[in-house]
Image: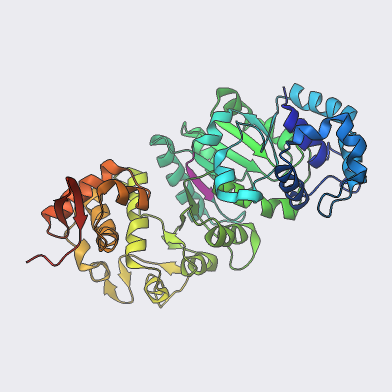
Amino acid sequence: MLSSDTQAILLLCAGFGQNRQTKPVPLTLGEYNSLASWLREENMFPQDLLNPHFINRLPQLKINKLDSNRLVALLQRGGLLALTVEKWFNQGLWIISRADNNYPERLKQQLKNLAPPILYGIGNQDLLFKGGLAVVGSRHVAQEGLEYTYRVVETCAEQNIQVISGGAKGVDQASMLGTLKAGGTVVGVLANNLLKASVNGKYRPSIKEGNLTLISAVDPNASFNAGNAMGRNKYIYALADYGLVISSDYNSGGTWAGATEALNKIKEIPILIRTQGTLPKGNQALLKKGAIPFPEPPWNHPLKELIETKILDYKSRGTDKNTQLNLFSNDNPSTISYKETNSRSQEEDIPSDFKSIKSPSERLYNAVLPIIIQELKTPQDDKSLATHLDIQIGQLRKWLKQAVIDKKVIKQTKNKQVIYETKTIE
C-alpha cells in the first residue's frame, strides 16, 4: 500500500510512463522542493493536497512561482495513478517517497534537497540502510581494471561489505555481478529501465534471494537519458560509506562527473581511487582533486580497517598537491608505482613515524594522533572530544591511553573530572 503522502508526491512528480511532453508536465526536483518548502511554512503535508476542498481553492493560491492550474491538473490524475501503480505492484516493484519512514536516511543526510522525491525499487529494502563501498568506473575499461574490480568486490563479499554501483556496462556491472557471485549483497542504482533489469536473468535469482536490490529515481520504464545517468551518480555515493573509482576518463563521462561532484559536494563520503597498475588520465586528475589512494593489495587485514587507516593517513598529511603529484612516476604520468617513485625507494616515501609500524591498528593510531594533539591544545574530557571528532568513545579512550603512555598527552583530574590536554612534557 502507498501512503497518502506518497500518492500525492507521485501525482505531482511521476510521469506514469507517459512522454515527458505530455501535459500536465510533472514537477521537476527543483519545483517539488519549492512546493515542499511552501507546505512546511503552512504546516501542511503532501497528503493535504489531496483534500477536495484544498484542490478547489488551489487556483486562488500563490505558491512561490508554481502554476496553480498545473498543480490542480497533476493532482487530478488519480485514475492514471491507480492503474499504473497496480501494474507496477503486480510486477514486483515497490515505491517509497521522501515522506515515508522507510526512505533511506542516508540520502536525506548527504543530499538534503537533492534527494529524489520518489524511489522505485525491487528487492530487499533493508539493503538501502546497510551502507558499504560504492564501486564505479568507466564503461570501457581495460582487462586489468576489471580484474582489479573482481578482487575488490570478492574481498567485500568475504568481509560482509556491501557494494553499491550503477548497473552500467563495464566496471559497474562487473562489480555487481562479481559481488553476487561471491555471495555478497548489492544495491544497484539504475538510471533507466528498472522493470527490464528486474526480470533480467543475471539479476532475478539474487533479487529473489534477498541479496540484490535495484532502485531508480526515474520512471521504471524510462529509456536511457544522459541527464538521468549523470544525476543518479550522487545517489550511489550517498548510499555508501566510501566510494571507489576504478577507472575514469579525464574531464568527460559519467564516472568523472560523478566523482568530481562527490568530491565537491558530498564531503562526508571519502572518495578513494585505484592507484595500482596502468591507469587512465582521469585517475591521476581525481587524485589531484582530493581523491584518496585505495589501499594497496594484497589486503591481509580487514578492508574497512585498511580504508580507515588510509583516510586518516591522508588527512594527517594534508592535501598538498605536490605531495599527491609525487605518487606518480615522472616517466609515465598514467602509471603509479609504490615500489619506486621518482627514482626513490618505497621506504624513502614513508614518513619516519610509519617506518617501524607493523599493524594497521598502530598505523591508525599514528595517523589520528596529530589530530588529537591539535584538539587537546584546549583541555577537555574524553566525551567532549569524542563528540567533537564524531568517533566512538571506546576507540578514543584506547588512543588517549596510548598517547598518555607515549607522553604526547597529559591526563589529570580537575574538579573531580578527568581532563586531557597537550603540553610540553619534561
- Residue occupying the far front of the picture: 415
User: Who's the residue at 28% across and 63% down the image?
Assistant: 374
Is 89 situated above or below 108? Answer: above
Q: Would residue 298 be counted in the magenta stretch?
A: no
User: Who's the residue at 88% across and 31% down the image?
Assistant: 53
Is 288 situated above or below 247? Answer: below
Quarter of the image for residue 78 reads top right
User: Who's the residue at 82% across and 49% down the image?
Assistant: 63
Q: Nearer the viewer, residue 76 or 26?
A: 76
Badge count: 0
Q: Would residue 134 be counted in the magenta stretch?
A: yes
Quarter of the image for residue 75 reads top right
Q: Nearer the viewer, residue 15 or 29?
A: 29
Which region shows up in magenta? 131-135
- Would you say 156 lies left or right of 369 here? right
- Secondary structure mainly formed by the magenta segment: strand
Q: Residue 5's x, y, as percent?
A: 73, 32
- Would you say 225 lies left or right of 417 here? right
Q: Residue 43's x, y, as percent?
A: 71, 39
